[in-house]
Amino acid sequence: QRRYVAFGKELQRLKSITQKLLLLSRIDAGELKLNLRPMNLSQLVEGIVEDTEVLAPTLEVKSELAPDLWVMADADLMKQVVQNLSANAIKYNQAGGFVRFTLCANSQTVQLLMENSGRGIPPEDHDKVFTRFYRGDKARSRKVSGAGLGLSLAREIVRAHQGELVLEH
């Protein structure tokens, strides 16, 4: 029965990788169709904050979210972006650390900042983090699940929404 559980987890992981690759191929081909509708970004991020608290009970999860912030976006794709960023903030963190979400806006832009207490990304790797299949520190990568697609996919989705995803250091 343990084999079944392990097999099921691996099957889910492969399914997730396949879905990400298919979405990236649609983006590359210029065939991504956005389902743009007004969506409450504050509510979406608040839900991800709550999920993060459940998924990472040993981390301190902090948030400062502008209330009732509405944007025109594809809600499913935006959820995938925030989930990918949150998953990375959890995976690449330190024991007893923190994850911080900040959502703010002015008359022209909306900004979501995500920070964590992880050891950071070496300066020589900053330009590689959005490259497909890039996993960073090889010793650390063996201990952390993933295929190195999350950040590249998140960046492409944000770009499709006329935004930009950047690494600040």
Image: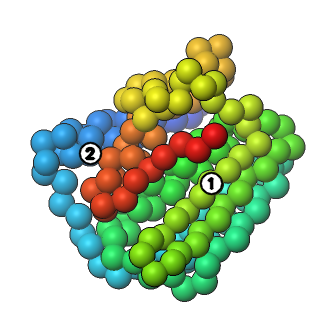
Q: Is residue 117 left or right of residue 85?
A: right
**What element does badge 1 sit on?**
strand
- For image coordinates 43% across by 35% down, the residue present is 130
Q: What x and y, as percent, mark residue 92?
A: 67, 35
Image location of residue 115, percent across then percent down: 67, 50
**x and y, in percent, of residue 18 in the image:** 31, 36
- Up-down relation of residue 148 to residue 117 (above or below): above
- Any mark on residue 114, and which? 1
Q: Which mark is residue 93?
A: none
Marks 2 and 1, the one that precedes in the sequence: 2
For badge 1, the amino acid type reads Met
The answer to whether residue 37 is seen in the rendering is: yes
Identify the secondary structure beneath mark 2.
helix
Q: Residue at x 39, y 47 (%)?
A: 155
- Relative horizontal placement of residue 68, taking residue 37 as reference (left or right): right
Depth check: give the residue in front, 48 or 85. Answer: 85
Residue pictured at 45% horizontal, 81% vertical: 107
Identify the image quadrant of the N terminus: top right
- Circle 2 or circle 1, nearest the eye: 1
Q: Indicate whether 75 appears above or below 20.
A: below
Residue 149 relative to residue 63: left or right: left
The residue indicated by pointer 2 is 23
For the residues labelled 2 and 1, the Cα–Cα distance comes to: 24 Å
Q: Quadrant of residue 136?
A: top right
